[in-house]
Image (tube, coloured by chain):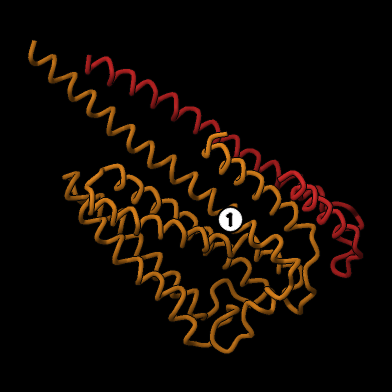
Chain colours: A red, B orange
Amino acid sequence: MKNRLLFLLLLTISQLLQAQDMATTFRSEGKIYVVIAVASVVLGGIFFFLLRTDAKLSKLESEITKRENSKEL
Amino acid sequence: MKLDTIWKAACIALLTYSVIGGLLMPVPALDILNETIRNLYFHVPMWFTMLALLTVSMVSSIRYLAKGELRMDHWTEASVHVSLQFGVLGLITGSLWAKFTWGDFWPPDPKLNAAAIAMLLYLTYPILRSTIQDEVLKARISSVLAIFAYPVYIALVFILPRMYASLHPGNGGNPGFNAYDLNSNMRLVFYPAVFGFILLGWWMTSHRAKMASLSKRMEELELSDTFLESKK
């Protein structure tokens, strides 16, 4: 698993190092990284929301299970 | 580690990778498309996710009708709901992409129109549900709709457009997906993006299904509360 991840990382890096023919000014100004930062923040926000919802749903579920169990007794 | 944690972590990793790799990794330089070829990583997975979730809805409908577990009906409702969201995103992103490459927000393309009709077909699902009060009847009738709408969706989106000339690759007289697919660099991002978005759709669906199941259990608790009080 770790080796595969490392391989993927190296692959990405090696491909970044290759010369780009397309949209060179777009990259040479380096501002594509701003876009990546923004997109990553958006993604991060979505993941945060999903994980929070996960936690809240589990909490609600355990509370309901508790109430159901107390009923049965 | 729990299975839940594994696939959620995989979803986060795959999507993060596909956004970064999708913007940075090299792509073939093609006329007209230019850098918009990268939209392949974000527009096409919307449709793959929609298809995957509709498959889930079809399977859970069959399971509901076979076993009568209300939980399965919650899964059908949730997967159709989330798949419609992805379908809307697919239409909007495709429309934007079309404007800058094919010259129109809605070019006269059989795949676009068929996809729009297929969306309308599945829009009847939530509308049908909202018209039926009885819970079991609602679940049964809408399960039947979800089962039969599925092959119609497949025919509309994946079969009929291929029989006519279409602007979409892989249809009619067009050169096909191979033009991009042969590029192994793009595959390195495209497949992870597809799997990442499908997992995201599954995640969103599981939330909605769980919410429905929990509110059902809450309802039953409250019902038994009022029953106990009336007994006193």
Determine the residue located farthest toward the left in the rendered image.
B231
Name the residue rendered at 50%, 56% in the picture: B86
Q: Can you give x and y, in whole percent of width and height, for residue B161 in the image?
A: 47, 80
Q: Quadrant of the C terminus of chain A?
A: top left
Quick one: label 1, few (<14), some, or many (20+) residues within 10 Å? some
Q: Nearer the viewer, residue B69 or B208?
A: B69
Local secondary structure at mark 1: helix
Residue B33 lies, in percent from the top left, at 72, 74
Q: How many marks?
A: 1
Rendering quarter of residue B166: bottom right
Residue B192 in the image: above or below residue B110: above
Residue B136: image location, x then y, percent: 18, 46
Question: Residue reaching furthest top?
Answer: B232
| Identity, as a three-letter code, of the amino acid under mark 1 | Phe
Q: Is residue B65 left or right of residue B90?
A: left
Residue designated by label 1: B195
Q: Residue at x 60, y 39 (%)?
A: A47
Please identify the quarter of the rendering in which residue B227 is found.
top left
Is B184 on the left-hand or right-hand side of B222?
right
Q: Chain of mark 1?
A: B
Q: Hey, which quadrant is residue B56 in on the image? A: bottom left
Q: Is residue B150 left or right of residue B219?
A: right
- The image shows residue A31 at horizontal and vertical percentages of 85, 52
Q: Is residue B67 above or below residue B212?
A: below
